[in-house]
Image (tube, helix red, strand yellow):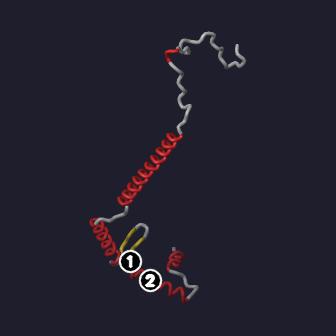
Amino acid sequence: MSELPHTPEPHEVPDAWHAHTAEEGAPQAEHGARANPVALGVTLLAIVFSFVFLLLIVWGYFTSYTTQMKAEHRETVTEPQRIDYMTARSGAQTRLSQAPGWIDRENGTVHIPLDRATNLILEEYQRVGMNPNAQTDQEVAASDG
């Protein structure tokens, strides 16, 4: 047995595969025993330039694709959408500028024209501003309720 447990026993007689005859000629050098620095340098440069070229292609594609996606997703309003919006807005303004009306009768919510609401708030501010102890309409309503 050999000195190390994992080392196999040497063959007493080599196999036929190990035996070389004179007709085979001189043994060949092992593959990769002699490195060609020029071939290695050219291969390295080819790999680096290929990588940079592919990187530029991917970057260009990504930039083009994201630019296109941003353009497609940019918020745009078509003419029919604008007309619908303007019609709805005009109708809402007309309804709100007319006489007072109920918004939610159960909760006691009404709408009044903006001009009227502005005047009521200004009157209340003037009244409270002249008399610091005066109660606002909301405070009066809360104390009555």
Question: Which secondary structure, mark 2?
Answer: helix
Residue 39, numbered label: none
- Spot the residue most to the bottom: 130
In the rendered view, does 135 fall on the left or right side of 110?
A: right
Quadrant location of the N terminus? top right
Query: Which is more N-terminal, label 2 or label 1?
Result: 1
Percent x, y of residue 39: 49, 40
Q: Is residue 57 above or below residue 78?
A: above
* In the rendered image, the vertical position of residue 110 relative to residue 21, given as above or below: below
Q: How many marks?
A: 2
Pick the residue in front: 27 or 104.
27
| Residue under label 1 | 112
Pointers 1 and 2 in contact (C-beta within 8 Å): yes
> Where residue 105 sits: x, y (%)?
39, 68
Direction top: furthest residue: 13
Please provide percent x and percent y for residue 94: 31, 75
Q: Is residue 80 left or right of residue 26?
A: left
Work out how far the residue at label 1 is from the one at label 2, CA to CA, in angstroms. 10 Å
Residue at left offset 36%, top offset 57%? 68
Please tell me which residue is depicted at 50% across the width and 84% down the height of the picture.
125
Residue at 72% of width from left, 18% of height from top? 3
Q: Secondary structure at mark 1?
A: loop
- Amino acid on which disc 1 is placed: Ile
Q: Hey, what amino acid is under mark 2? A: Leu
The residue labelled by disc 2 is: 120
Q: Write down the quadrant of residue 74 in the picture.
A: bottom left
**Quarter holding residue 87:** bottom left
